[in-house]
Amino acid sequence: MESQISPADILNAIKRRRKSALIAFFIVLVASLSYALFAAPTYRSSATILIEQQEIPQDLVRSTVTSFADQRIQMTIQRVMTFAKLSQLIKKYDLYPEEREKEPLELVVEMMREDINHRMISAEVVDPRSGRPMEATIAFNIAYNSESAKTAQTVANELTSLFLKENIKNRTEMAEEAESFLSAEVVRLRNKSQDLEQKLSDFKEKNLRKLPELTTLNLNLMDRAEREYSELSRQIKALEERKVYLESQLNQQSPHANTVGDGSQSVLTPEARAKLLQNRYISLLAKYSEKHPDVVKTKRQLDNLLQEVEIPNDSRFISQQTEIYRAQMSKLLTKYDSEHPDVKSLASVIKTFEQQLVDLEISAEYENDDADNPAYVQLAASLEAAKVELLHLKASQTKVKKKLDELEISLLESPNVEREYRSLARDYENTARKYQEVKAKQLEASLAMSLEQERKGERFTLIEPPLLPVKPVKPNRILIAVAGVVMSFVMAGGLILLLEKVDQTIRSGRALQQFTGAPPLAVIPHIVTLEEVTARKRMTILLLGLSLAGVVGVTMAVHYAFMPLDVLWYVALRKLG
Amino acid sequence: MERIKEAIERAADKRDEHKAPSYAGVPKQQRPFQAISSSGEISDKINYPISYLNTQIHHVDDTWLKKNRVLHGGSEPEIISAYKLLRTQVLQKMNANNWKSLAVISARSGQGSTLTAVNLAISIAMEYRHTTLLADFNLKAPQVHRYFNYEPTIGLSDYLLHDAPVNDMLFNPGIESLVVLPGREAFDDSSERLMSPSVRGLVDDMVHRYKSRLVIFDLPPLLESDDTVAFLDQFDAGLLVVEECKTTKSDILRMSELLGDKPILGTLLNNASG
């Protein structure tokens, strides 16, 4: 890098490179000026859409459309800018005719997308909840660029109305979806709730006594039952003692009056007498053989008595007597055969007694009237009574025991039952509550749906419809022309710089000094010859003449072939101004 | 050496046949030539009468000189003063080091070495204390004579080929104290020739003949042939000619590489526009 570049060096550099610099300069200049003059204009028509807040306060009716405005706008724009919709527009208004011939439709649609611009307009607002300033989108702008002003307006119009329609469709769809979802949930929850209710009552029925509410009662019952049981046990014990006592007493008594041992004399009924004789006979037979005179005497007394009087209605007596006769019969049969008249008579007596027994057994069941000893009878009666009561008590006790066992089981199972019961109850409560909640939400959602359907929700309103553009938005011709001039200088300058940089020759005495370390001994300037001077003069004249001719020629050509000059002047003025 | 002597003696024989030029009245110390004594010794003193009986005088038209950018009385003052500056420094350095011969060297052809040699020689000759011999040793393409609009009948090539007498080749282009030894034909084997003993002898003669004589050699461009490198040890110092916007830095580097330790008086920026 050269350390100091004097103005002389710069001038020299320019002089040296003037040819290339001039060429660059003119190329850039001509290019930019032609672009400035002849570039196709782009017209732009735009619509401004205001985002109006919901009329009905949010506290009263909450909207189900919950995304941010920006997001919704973007989404709606995407829905409008689909291939289907845009290609429809292209065909309807015959847009991009040349491009459609050369390029596939997808590319043309893509070009159209680039010609569609949208922009959010936001304002600083204060967030009502937090009090902090924030940016909120309050409106947005949708625009279309085209080479023709009319087309720009028409297409912008179409796009705007497409956009607004899509938005409305979108919103109602969202609200309806929310509402139907919630309705379905309501139904589901209601069914579930009913199921659980049913389950709960079934359970209650099944586990009636084990229900936790009855625990206290059950405890009380159990307490009472236990006391009853012990009371009964006590009574039973007492009664059994009494029974034993009575039995022992009874054993000491004879069922018949005056038949205890010998000696006691009293008037006996024939029945009593028969029983007495029988007993005596049996006891004598136990001691002596039947041939004994006492035995024979007793036997004869008994037989005679029995022939005279009725047979006593005492089954015991009868059966005993039958036994006696049967014993006699067997004895007889050892001596005589069955045809012997003694045998026959005895046999008939046996028969009679047997029959009597049968009859007695059929007819009289509970008559216990064979005992005639009043003490005996009383004792027997008391014993019977005690026995009966004992049976009753025992039965009661069994019942109470059973009840006690049942209560115990109930109490033991109660906690499990309680747990299951509580969980069922809880499920049911939860479902019921949820159902209430969802029902409330569904109501809200259906309100919101009505809100959308009546267009009372957040709305997009067109406040500035697309106008017919008068001036093109591009290109800014004056700016381009000025920029073009500047660029020409810059390019020329840049080219000079570049050439100088690239140039490896020595271009000045100082450069030579820098390179060799010592200044040159002398610097010989260019020696001009006469021929050079004249040649240069000639060249200048020639160039001037040519340029003049060129300018004239171009002007004429433009005037006659392209556009008359005065017209061109006005066109240029219009375009530039 | 021998040949020159013979040549000069032969020339001396013809001396009387020629008319003395108008320089006869020039004071001794200003006369460029000193006759070699018959003994053949080189004399230190400028005692002998100097005569241009040996050299022809060839006047050049001013228009020719102008056209070919040759320095002359009617040149632009800035040109004259530029060359004066060059001349002064060159002479200073040559005298300080007791150098007698100078080669004007450029990198490539067309960069002005021949013109510089010519103009430097003329500039030095104008201050005619110093006699200058401008020798065209560019055996590949002799150019010097053209600047003077002179067509030599015999030149250096004839000496090399046929032993022609050098004295007869010399001419004076109408400028005091300047004698030119032209080329004539070109050689292919120029560098070999330059290293030949005959050339060495001639150079030796030229340099040592007169004390105050300065010899300026014109040689082919350094980077386009090996002539100059071959001739390197036959001249005392070099002068590098650099043409503005033509000579590249790499060429300069290469030149310095080739020249090695050879004393270089300095550089000259030629054809400058600033």
Image (tube, rainbow, N blue to C red):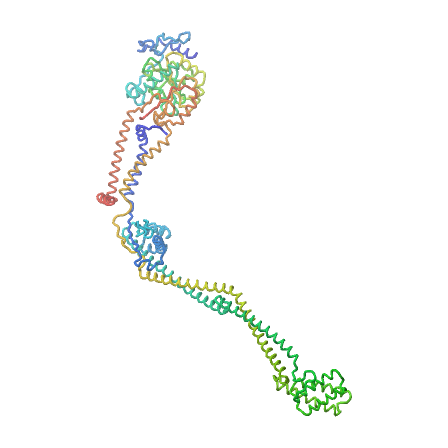
Give the camera-side residue of A409 and A189. A409
Q: Residue at x 33, y 58 (%)?
A: A59
Residue A418 screen position, x and y as percent? 49, 64
Residue A334 screen position, x and y as percent? 77, 87
Image quarter (top left, top right, bottom left or bottom right) of the N terminus of chain B? top left
Left or right of residue B238, residue A397 in this image: right
Give the camera-side residue of A42 and B229. A42
Residue at the left extreme of this rendering: A566
Is A287 situated above or below A422? below
Residue A212 screen position, x and y as percent? 49, 66
Q: Residue at x 27, y 33 (%)?
A: A543
Residue A136 screen position, x and y as percent? 32, 51
Give the camera-side residue of A115 and A20. A115
Left or right of residue A353, residue A468 in this image: left
Q: Quadrant of residue A161?
A: bottom left
Residue at the right extreme of this rendering: A335
Give the camera-side residue of B105 and B95. B95
Q: Is residue A40 visible?
A: yes
Q: Is residue A121 visible?
A: no
Q: Quadrant of residue A477?
A: top left
Q: Quadrant of residue A475?
A: top left
